[in-house]
Image (spheres, rainbow, N blue to C red):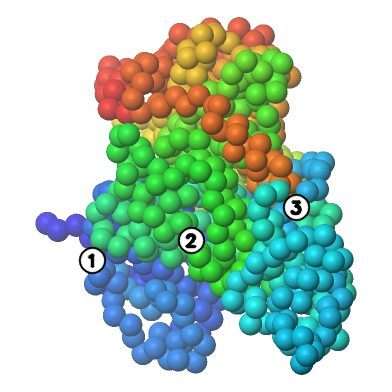
Amino acid sequence: MAQDPLVIFTPSGKRGRFPAGTPVLTAARQLGVDLDSVCGGRGICSKCQITPSYGDFPKHGVHVEQNALSDWNKVEARYDEKRGLKPGRRLGCQATVQGDVVIDVPPESQVHRQVVRKAATARVIEMDPATRLYYVEVQEPDMHEPTGDLERVARALAAQWDIPEISTEFSTLAKLQPILRKGSWKITVALHKDDKDSVPRLVAAWPGLHEGGIYGLAIDLGSTTIAAHLTDLETGEVKASSGIMNPQIRFGEDLMSRVSYAMMNPGGDVEMTRAVREALDTLAREIAAEAGIDPSLILETVFVCNPVMHHLLLGIDPVELGQAPFALATSDAMTLTARDLDLTCLPASAQIYILPCIAGHVGADAAAVALSEEPGKSKDLALIVDVGTNAEILLGDTTRVLACSSPTGPAFEGAQISSGQRAAPGAIEAIRIDPVTKEPRFRVIGCDKWSDEEGFAEETAASGITGICGSGIIEAVAELRTAGLMDPSGLIGGPDKTGTDRCIPEGRTFSYLVHDASEEGGPRITVTQGDIRAIQLAKSALYAGARLLMDTRGVDKVDRVVLAGAFGAHISPLHAMVLGMIPDVPLEKVTSAGNAAGTGARIALCNLAARREIERVVREITKVETAIEPKFQEHFVAANAIPHATDPFPELKKLVNLPQVSFNTGGDDRGGRRRRKRA
């Protein structure tokens, strides 16, 4: 008997089978997907817009045909005619499921908007920007001395600022004459200079004395989120920070899934490039509006990103990054223009700088972390971990710096988790389980109170309690271990062994019930055995990458650990250590660097010398390739235990008494071993 079509929603990762003819909005509601609608499904409000994706999706195990959704109907056609739908968009209340389909819910269609927590970290940066303003008074044209306007601007810059030569693009040249005349031959120009030997490029001009400032964007282009800091290029002040989900999630939540999509779908790389560039345009427009500035004043952008995102941003097929020897098209820093990347929100001549990549799977984002945290200048041995869908790890001191990447996957972001969701109001972000009563209490994004405090229900009434995000699932799994509800192998015990009815049967295993609002029509939030396995795989990859660097360096311990990235800034160091995500060190030696990659991008945006410095530093970093190192698998398997099968974790044992419990049964244990072996 044929199965009903499979519907997979991104970025939530929620999936289910529904009879053909089911409206997408209905499927979303039944799965608890965050899809807005206020008109009762009549196609009036347009809040339920969705984007279907077609082709092969190996990560999801589906092939999506072009007819996976119903054809446009009259309601959609009328709405598109009157108000317009973005290309590829459908109305979720009108489109019906006809076959297996992957559906992206864009941020503007989500009731609870994603909280992209990559705020700018306070940092003193010496200002030496590549783009600067110059006010000049230009000689008027003279019939007896025929020279062009551009030549007279260049002559004025030479005389008044000792700048002997300039160049420009046609798009800037075409605007120069009316600006000169409007300013009565007094103008302000913006010149971009790559380094001390380059010829400055005229990228913008204004009549008279321009006092509106010029700005730059520092963009951390991640696999899951895109974060931007709008920065004043004269003072270094961050005027606004904002972020959006990376729309490429619908093509695959991790990098290799996107490479596979490009391999299996002709033109897939072009499709992903278009999606991310459109998202960047949207982000630039939104962040400029938030700061109250004209986007035409954004004259420079610095990008940091992993190698796959690097290639897809540039419009380069990432297929070579999916197979050994993981060759990059180029690893050098790049200087481009907004026109080169089709970023229409910015001036065509706006300058783009992309930091160098370190190696095939260690990209410009890792270089930015190195620029921000400077492990090569550390007197003690520092392990810096940028936690994300693809973790970048640096280990170093003044002697030597090593780097690797580790494919942690999207579990840390709340994906592939049964009740998981991205960080948004209503998501559980912290949890504690009483070791005696086994009862949980938790805190959700958007409310400072814990669930057992007075006023919690009132303060969360608007957002509800909607799921559990990355930091929440980390704490939940660690708390299950410390409360004696889960054994070192990761198995949850049954109610007869744990003494709590919150451990509920689910097939051959058990789940832990965190919150149940099903009687009021709300969600039932649990931590399942499958959730724990997903977290085990992610944390094992992270720990194995760190151990591999330590092996290469010939050490068994590090002096300190720095957690970087938006996710790293919001997880509890104690819970990370209980889980075995990071090596054993004194807890006070675990610190957060915030969005270190974004900070590195800001440094490169504001300081020209920093660009030359990181271009030099990356050539001195030793790259360790986890994909071909035999010991990686050995470390990975040992790290499946919580916190670890062989490493003793003496510092952790000073802080936490981990119960010596075992819930292994023959069937469960064999199944667990089989899963770990396959992983």
Give left or right: position of 370 versus 609: left
Contact (Cβ within 8 Å) of mark 3 with mark 1? no
Location of residue 187 (image quadrant): bottom right
Answer yes or no: is residue 477 visible. yes
Tell me the residue at 39%/35% (across/down): 530
Tell me the residue at 35%/37% (across/down): 326
Q: Residues within 10 Å of mark 1 (few under 14, many from 20)?
A: some
Contact (Cβ within 8 Å) of mark 2 with mark 3? no
For the residues labelled 1 and 2, the Cα–Cα distance comes to: 23 Å
Q: Residue furthest front?
A: 144
Please name the amino acid that badge 2 sits on: Val
Q: Nearer the viewer, residue 529 or 451?
A: 529
Please name the amino acid that badge 3 sits on: Pro
Q: The C terminus appears in which quarter of the rendering?
A: top left
Give left or right: position of 185 versus 524: right
Q: In this figure, which residue is indicated by the disc labeled 3?
A: 129
Q: Nearer the viewer, mark 3 or mark 1?
A: 3
Q: Nearer the viewer, mark 2 or mark 3?
A: 3
Q: Secondary structure at mark 3?
A: loop
Please name the amino acid that badge 1 sits on: Glu
Tell me, for residue 84, which label it has, or none. Answer: none
Precedes in sequence: disc 3 or disc 1: 1
Q: In this figure, which residue is indicated by the disc labeled 2?
A: 276
Tell me, for residue 65, which label it has, or none. Answer: 1
Q: Nearer the viewer, residue 629 or 418?
A: 629
Measured along the vertical axis of the image, is residue 618 above or below residue 230? above
